[in-house]
Image: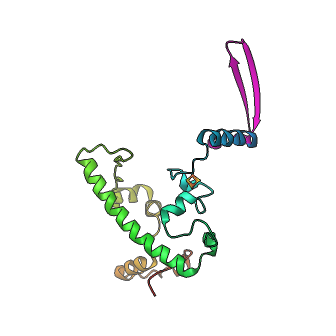
């Protein structure tokens, strides 16, 4: 439904036994409501279970199933606050523990990969082969410099760091001034570092 961004649906239901055609029209909201009601009905009181779509779910930071999996953020009672209200020390501990889990997950992934490569069939685990990028050393473009001009060829290579450009400039002993005014400063980033106090 969301894939097609449609705002309304017309559904023709063919009642073959009664030889009747019923035409139903739904707005987007009505269709969503119907789907949720049907899903809730089909699942009964079943709690949510972690699945491959959790990453795009609006409840991904509050969902009980996911909090339970983390094992650190309280599920209920007065301690069951949203992540934004977690004490900073608890968030720090969570990040440190998550780092350990990530390391174990990477190791587990390697082990599964080895088993898959050895031919094991493991439900829910598969190898996806992806070809590496095909690249050509830039100096192989030399014949194009004459044909297209150096500016056009060099522009296909993108940008270089200021430090690298300055090294080349100095090494070349050119008398042309370094184009300092053309240096672009990219937006910086701030990263939170966490460690045990
Ligand atoms: S985050 Fe929770 S509610 Fe959302 S899809 Fe995952 S299990 Fe279901």
Is residue 99 in view from this perspective?
yes
Horizontal and vertical percent position of residue 87: 59, 79
38 relative to 85, above or below: above
Q: Is residue 112 left or right of residue 78?
A: left
How many numbered marks does the figure carry?
A: 0
Image quadrant in which you'd find residue 104? bottom left
Q: Is residue 55 left or right of residue 5?
A: left
Residues 191 and 171: in front is: 191
Residue at the spot 32% in from the left edge and 59% down from the top edge: 108
93 relative to 70, above or below: below
For the rendered model, the colour scheme is rainbow
Residues 74 and 51: in front is: 74
- In the rendered image, the quadrant that contains the N terminus is top right
**Seen from this angle, which residue lies furthest left?**
118
Horizontal and vertical percent position of residue 21: 74, 18
Magenta residue span: 1-28
160 relative to 20, above or below: below
Image quadrant in which you'd find residue 76? bottom right
Residue at the spot 75% in from the left edge and 43% down from the top edge: 29
User: Magenta stretch containing residue 13, yes or no?
Assistant: yes
193 relative to 128, above or below: below
Horizontal and vertical percent position of residue 59: 62, 58
Is residue 140 in view from this perspective?
no
Residue at the spot 59% in from the left edge and 59% down from the top edge: 63
Horizontal and vertical percent position of residue 13: 70, 22
Residue at the spot 67% in from the left edge and 13% down from the top edge: 16
């Amino acid at each position: 439904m969301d894939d097609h961004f449609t705002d309304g649906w017309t559904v023709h239901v063919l009642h073959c036994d009664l030889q009747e055609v019923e035409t139903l029209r739904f707005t987007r909201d009505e269709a969503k409501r119907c789907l949720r009601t049907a899903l809730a009905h089909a699942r009964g009181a079943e709690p949510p279970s972690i699945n491959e779509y959790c990453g795009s779910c609006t409840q991904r930071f509050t969902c009980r199933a996911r909090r339970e999996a983390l094992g650190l953020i309280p599920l209920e009672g007065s301690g069951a606050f949203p992540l934004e209200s977690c004490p900073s020390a608890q968030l720090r501990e969570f990040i440190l523990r998550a780092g350990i889990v990530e390391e174990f997950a990477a190791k587990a992934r390697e082990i599964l990969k080895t088993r898959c490569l050895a031919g094991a069939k493991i439900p829910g685990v598969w190898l996806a082969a992806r070809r590496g990028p095909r690249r050509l050393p830039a100096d192989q473009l030399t014949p194009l410099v004459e044909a297209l001009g150096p500016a056009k060829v060099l522009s296909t290579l993108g940008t270089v760091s200021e430090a690298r450009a300055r090294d080349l400039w100095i090494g070349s002993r050119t008398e042309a001034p370094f184009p300092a005014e053309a240096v672009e400063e990219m937006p910086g980033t701030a990263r939170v570092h966490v460690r045990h106090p």
